[in-house]
Image: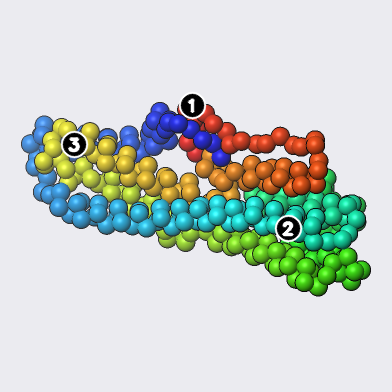
Amino acid sequence: MVLSDTVPWRNVLRIHRPMLLAVAGIAAAVSFVDWQLGLALPFTPVPFQIVGVAIAFFLGFRNNAAYDRWWEGRKIWGGIVNASRAFARQALTLTDAPPDVQRALVLRHLAWVEALRCQLRQQPPLDTVRGYLSDADQATLAGQRNVASALVHLQGAHVAALARDGQLTEERLVAIDRTLTELHALQGMCERIQSTPLPTAYRYFTRLFVRGFCLTLPIGLVENHGPVTVVVVLLVALVFLIAETIGRLLEEPFTTTSIYGLPLQTIARNIEIDLRQRLGDVDLPPAIAPERRANLDVLL
């Protein structure tokens, strides 16, 4: 995720340049026919006003749905942060296991965070989580389709074994199992967002209606605005095109192809720093701050 204090208007115009040029060309042609050739076009702005309001509502619904997906993803990862801290606290304070066993539980959880991050971004997780796991865990995960889910299962089996060995009371086992269940539920919520994109009709018809409206708008405005039609239509088209682009950029909160994708690596690194401090580690990995630029180099 990239933060910025300003919007790169040069890049905004470059992205929409083909469409804006087409709109300007049509507006100029319509203005020439209507004013220079004296061929009055039998159109009024009323139908375009009605259609414009309808498209604005449609676009608003689509963008709200896209933003809801983005914000829900951020809330889920906020829940992962809280549940991660809770699990580390439980592993270190509720179990009577030796320190190396407690450490293995916490590191395995860090592997789960990294595995989930990689899976949501369509990246292979095994190489990333290798440094957190024992050889036995790595062998168990080999060939697993859902590595993150398999790691939660390993955690549950390990905690249950501690209870059988008398290193964890039944009440404390229930508390830890509740946290593991919450982590599994949060993972499922992320997978639901990833595997269920916005319906094709939302994306296709929004794009089609916006472009069709922008291209035909000069016909309805030329009678009242004359040569100024080009400027008016370009301003209206730019607003609609930017609004449509914003919704498209927010549809996939876990993407790496847009600067507006959630900063999963930053969140995962913050979790790792917190949990390693609970373990007493001194050599901590550096924090990863979202990239901040005075002016964005790219919009998409």
Mark 2, residue position? 87
Towards the viewer: 115 or 96? 96
Would you say residue 151 is visible in this rendering? no
Mark 1, residue position? 294
Examine the rendered structure and indicate whether residue 39 appears above or below residue 142.
above
Q: How many marks?
A: 3
**Which circle, 2 or 3, is nearer the viewer?**
2
The three-letter code of the residue at mark 2 reads Phe
Mark 3, residue position? 229
Q: Residue at x 12, y 45 (%)?
A: 41
> What is the CA distance from the residue labelled 1 to the residue labelled 2?
39 Å
Q: Is residue 42 left or right of residue 28?
A: left
Task: Classify the position of the N terminus by image quarter.
Answer: top right
| Mark closer to the chain start, 1 or 2 | 2
| Mark closer to the chain start, 1 or 3 | 3
Q: Are marks 1 and 3 in contact (CB under 8 Å)?
A: no
Q: Is residue 142 left or right of residue 208?
A: right
Q: Residue at x 50, y 39 (%)?
A: 300
Q: Mark 2: which secondary structure?
A: helix
Q: Measuring from the top left, give residue 101's x and y in whole percent.
A: 88, 55
Would you say residue 44 is visible in this rendering? yes
